[in-house]
Image (tube, grey):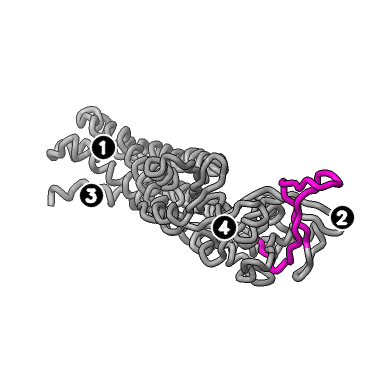
């Protein structure tokens, strides 16, 4: 029974009595402060994770995770190269592509585009562009038919509809008796896709069949490179290093060369948000310090009696550490439960507020999307819970130490 004495007395001190109701109220405030901090932190990090996921999904529907090419971007014998790349660890898909800059012209309007030639069946191993089709048929890209698919925004700016003809002009030129004539080819619009705002893919990207692209850019049987999909977005740099060692004659790039700055910004914002919001929990923990100091002052005579009955300083210290830790644990549990519920329902809550106020709080022109994303990650929940409990435990040390230094004679002198 003696070894459970600090736990028993600590639990008794948490209960409210008439003469220490104010102290119990301060304990309740500290508990709610910890719960509020944990709940807000879980919700904010879940929203940041949601934005991270949405941006990743939009970027890598269109862009390469890893690219294998060479410095002149003309790769021969790509079938053999594809087989070598596919044998590398963490590689889940490989597809060839032909890429070049071009102009699309229709009815006196011209737009610059990144024109990419693909093999539709193989492209689905490394891209989700087929799932972003809104009109037409992704599989309409067949060799020799000279069909093209493009973003909805690009088609709208050119005044095009499905079935219309569009002129594709490349940077190559033909020399004729009348002078230098740009090389061009008429294509039929057979499909439209929509990725979403933020990175202008819908305004600058168009796809044709790879063999048609080889003819258009005069590459014969060569390609511009291979597009590689990996098991996880963040292993791309490691895969790049491994491929560079296995294929030293090729140039290996990855998404960090083009979009790394976006993800570094999100990671920095998430870290700064964590540090700022953890201060809410720290403030609640500081409030817990003042609460326990008042409890120690209020319990001076009782501490002295316990000391005269044989309680050691460590036992006295444990009593008040138990009291502070219980407040921290209960506050953390309440905050975790509230944070999980709020994070999982944040999109619906914001949508309801927008509907109620008849306004749009989130604009795709600013945030890339027009809704609030939320993605709960359990590692964040665990990390926040550990930090919250650690701060609560840290807050109990000084008051508990002060209690352990109480001298029985001094405390009972005026009793």
Q: Are marks 2 and 3 in contact (CB under 8 Å)?
A: no
Q: Nearer the viewer, mark 2 or mark 3?
A: 2
Q: Which mark is on residue 61?
A: 4
* Residue occupying the point 46% across, 57% down: 79
Q: Decide which of tag 1 and tag 3 comes sooner along the chain.
A: 3
The image position of residue 314, as x and y in percent, is: 19, 37
The residue stretch that appears in magenta? 166-194
Q: CA distance from mark 1 to mark 2?
A: 93 Å
Can you identify the residue that label 1 sits on?
301
Which residue is the site of mark 2? 108
Q: CA distance from mark 1 to mark 4?
A: 70 Å
- Mark 3 Cα-neighbour bin, 10 Å: few <14, some 14–19, many ≥20: some
Q: Earlier in the sequence, mark 1 or mark 4?
A: 4
Residue sitting nearer the eye, 377 or 331: 377
Kindly tell me whether residue 343 is visible in this rendering: no
Q: Residue at x 24, y 43 (%)?
A: 319
Q: Is residue 196 left or right of residue 310?
A: right
Query: In the rendered structure, does residue 184 fall within the stretch colored magenta?
Result: yes
Return the residue found at the far front: 177
Label 2 element class: loop
The span from disc 4 to disc 2 (Cα, nearest Å) is 31 Å
Secondary-structure class at tag 3? helix
- Can you give x and y, in whole percent of width and height, for residue 332 in the image? 39, 51
Q: Which residue lies under the disc numbered 3?
A: 7
Q: Residue at x 80, y 57 (%)?
A: 157
């Amino acid at each position: 029974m003696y070894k459970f004495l600090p736990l028993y007395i600590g639990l008794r001190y948490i209960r409210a009595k008439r003469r220490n109701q104010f102290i119990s109220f301060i304990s309740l405030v500290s508990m709610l402060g910890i719960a509020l901090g944990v709940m807000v932190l879980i919700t904010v990090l879940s929203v940041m994770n949601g934005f991270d996921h949405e941006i990743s999904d939009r970027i890598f529907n269109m862009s390469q995770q890893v690219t294998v090419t060479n410095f002149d971007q003309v790769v021969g014998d790509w079938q053999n190269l594809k087989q070598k790349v596919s044998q590398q660890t963490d590689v889940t898909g490989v597809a060839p592509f032909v890429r070049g800059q071009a102009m699309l012209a229709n009815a006196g309007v011209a737009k610059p585009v990144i024109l990419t030639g693909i093999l539709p069946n193989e492209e689905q191993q490394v891209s989700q562009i087929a799932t972003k089709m809104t009109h037409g048929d992704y599989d309409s890209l067949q060799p020799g038919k000279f069909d093209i698919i493009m973003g909805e925004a690009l088609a709208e700016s050119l005044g095009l509809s499905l079935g219309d003809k569009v002129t594709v002009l490349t940077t190559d030129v033909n020399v004729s008796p009348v002078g230098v004539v740009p090389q061009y080819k008429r294509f039929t619009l057979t499909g439209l896709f929509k990725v979403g705002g933020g990175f202008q893919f819908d305004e600058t990207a168009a796809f044709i069949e790879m063999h048609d692209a080889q003819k258009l850019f005069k590459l014969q049987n060569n390609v511009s490179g291979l597009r590689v999909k990996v098991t996880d977005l963040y292993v791309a740099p490691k895969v790049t290093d491994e491929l560079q060692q296995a294929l030293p004659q090729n140039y290996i790039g990855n998404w960090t060369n083009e979009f790394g700055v976006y993800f570094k910004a999100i990671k920095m914002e998430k870290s700064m948000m964590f540090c700022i919001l953890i201060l809410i929990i720290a403030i609640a923990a500081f409030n817990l310090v003042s609460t326990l100091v008042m409890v120690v002052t209020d319990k001076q005579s009782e501490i002295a009696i316990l000391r005269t009955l044989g309680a050691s300083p460590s036992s006295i210290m444990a009593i008040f550490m138990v009291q502070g830790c219980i407040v921290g644990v209960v506050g953390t549990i309440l905050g975790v439960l509230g944070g999980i519920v709020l994070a999982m329902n944040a999109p619906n809550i914001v949508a309801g507020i927008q509907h109620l106020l008849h306004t749009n709080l989130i604009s795709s022109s600013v945030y890339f999307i027009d809704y609030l994303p939320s993605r709960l990650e359990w590692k964040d929940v665990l990390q926040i819970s550990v930090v919250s409990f650690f701060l609560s435990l840290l807050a109990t040390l000084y008051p508990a130490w002060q209690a352990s230094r109480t001298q029985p004679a001094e405390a009972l002198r005026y009793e």
